[in-house]
Image: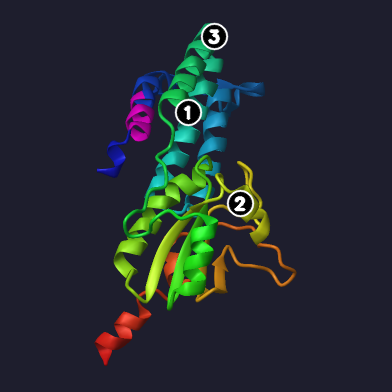
Amino acid sequence: MRFLHAYYLLNAAFLLLAFPLTRHLLAGPPDRGPEGVRVLTHEKQVALLLGSSLFAQAFRTHSAEHLLALLFSYAKTLALASAFFVSRRCLAATALQVLAVWLLAAPPEVDCAPAAPAVSPAALDAGLRGGAGRTVVLLHAGWHPGCAHFGPAFGRLARQHGNPALRFATLDLGRWPGHAARLGLELNATSSQLPTVVLYDGDAEVVRLPRKEAGGGVAKGRWSAKDVAAVLQLGTEAAAKKAA
């Protein structure tokens, strides 16, 4: 049901409309270079470049939602490139369609409640100081694409592993940028430090992903929900009790 959000439906509709044009250009015969050598057309060169980049990044996506969003982004770029090779009018029309989809269908917001409720920095600090057990916190920004598409995966982790001794919560750094500075996180649209997941034991930070470097900074990198479960050892206690 999560893929019935307007973001996925409108992007899919746009790609269905743009597919005939892109297919027509990519299915055309190859160009002839010097001495009759067959060479790829400009359209096919662009498609090959985008496809290679998409293939490389697909292995570093956070979730199925993130992978689908990445596919939408690359497909729209290919549609714009295809329209460019047709005419200025076609390019303008395609660009207006892409803009309309962007304005009408923002990525879904991070909403993991009730398994991982949204909290403020003050509420989080109070809960960490006064609560027993461990807390897993997702630090995100509502306008960051990677955060929006990791949210559902984090919600599933919270529903699967949450219990009175292991609580889950989310904190929107876009609303409290000062908390991002306090944690040493870069808060911008291209930041590879978002989203960040932090495990607290009481009020002491145990581990975070992406990992925190010895100098106090945060290592840049991409990771998946499986990495979160493995690093935080989610489920190991339940498995040990079951085995015993």
Q: Amino acid at mark 3?
A: Ser
Of 58 and 231, nearer the camera is 231
Of 130 and 136, nearer the camera is 130
Q: Amino acid at mark 1?
A: Lys
Residues rendered magenta in the picture: 6-13
Label 2, residues with CA under 10 Å away: few <14, some 14-19, many ≥20: some
Measure the alpha-carbon separation of dots 1 and 3.
17 Å
Q: How is the image coloured?
A: rainbow
Q: Residue at x 52, y 6 (%)?
A: 89
Residue denoted by label 2: 192
Label 1, residues with CA under 10 Å away: few <14, some 14-19, many ≥20: some
Magenta stretch: helix, strand or loop mostly: helix
All told, the count of numbered labels is 3
The reply to whether dot 2 and dot 3 touch (C-beta < 8 Å) is no
Looking at the image, is mark 2 or mark 3 nearer the viewer? 2
Of 244 and 13, nearer the camera is 244
Q: Find the residue positioned furthest to the right.
A: 215
The image quadrant where one finds the C terminus is bottom left
Q: x, y (%) of residue 241?
A: 29, 87
Judged from the image, the secondary structure of the residue bearing numbered disc 2 is: loop
Judged from the image, the secondary structure of the residue bearing numbered disc 1 is: helix
Q: Is residue 209 above or below residue 9?
A: below
The image quadrant where one finds the N terminus is top left
Q: x, y (%) of residue 5?
A: 32, 36
Residue denoted by label 1: 76
Label 3, residues with CA under 10 Å away: few <14, some 14-19, many ≥20: few
Q: Is residue 139 above or below residue 35?
A: below
The mark found on residue 87 in the picture is 3
Q: Is residue 140 visible?
A: yes
**Mark 2 or mark 3, earlier in chain:** 3
Q: Residue at x 56, y 16 (%)?
A: 84
